[in-house]
Amino acid sequence: MVSHFLLMVLYALLVSLFFTLLWRRGRREQIKLFLQIFLGMVGGGLLVAWLMYPFPSGPPAPIP
Amino acid sequence: MAEPGSPPAPPPQTAPAPRPAGNLVVAVLSAWLLPGLGHFYLGRRLRALAFFLLVVASMLIGVKLEGNLYRVVPGQPLTVLATLGAMGMGFPYFGLRYGLHYQGNVMGPGYEYGTAFLLTAGLMNLLLVLDAFDIVRGKKE
């Protein structure tokens, strides 16, 4: 079973690699931007999850 | 001011215009048709391969998770934007939609994540189209 966290990390990995290759040329700059985007996405996701933790999830959303 | 009888002054030296990297229409169309093909056409072979792998990986993960490959739903105008975004992946979109008759599974546990991956694949390829456009126009190396 694939976890939410693993999927989030995978998504962040793909997106950060993509923008790193698209926007930077030098190896050092690429590593810096990759870490910024990747850690920003994963850390931001964990932060938002932590902030939402006290709130109840509520009933499931209706299926369209 | 030149004196009468003197030879005419030579025209001012101008820097030679940079040679276009490729044909704009071919680059943009190929970039849209297959992820990375535009960069391959423009001589960026390694980056083309990397972009192809990234976009296709995103698409395959979305399919594996049974995400929604957007199509226009009458009465829901936002699906037009989402469909255009997903169509950004070019041939793979039409191959999935009309060749493999792919349909997501709304009851699948990975439906929402898969939808995000599929839409992201389309949007990433649209950015590659713009990147190819900028390379041909000389705005980017």
Image (cartoon, rainbow, N blue to C red):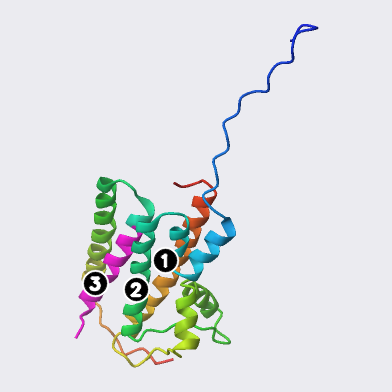
Which stretch is magenta? Answer: A1-19
Q: At which x and y percent is residue B51?
A: 37, 63
Q: In this view, does B114 lie to the left or right of B73?
A: left
Q: How crowded is mark 1: few (under 14 residues within 10 Å), some or many (20 or more)?
A: many
Q: Which amino acid does label 1 sit on?
A: Met
Question: Pointer 1: what residue?
Answer: B124
| Residue B71 numbered tag | none
Residue at image point 50% right, 46% down: B139
SS of the residue at dot 3?
A: helix
The chain that hosts pointer 3 is A
Q: Where is residue A54 in the image (x, y as percent from the top left)?
A: 21, 76
Q: Where A20 sits versus A2, above or below?
A: above
Residue at x 57%, y 55% (from the top left corner): B23
Q: Is residue A34 above or below residue A5?
A: above
Amino acid type at image mark 2: Ser
In the picture of the structure, the residue carrying the numbered disc 3 is A49
Distance from label 2 to label 1 (Cα)? 9 Å
* Residue position for label 2: B58
Q: Whole-Å distance between the Cαs marked 3 and 1?
A: 26 Å
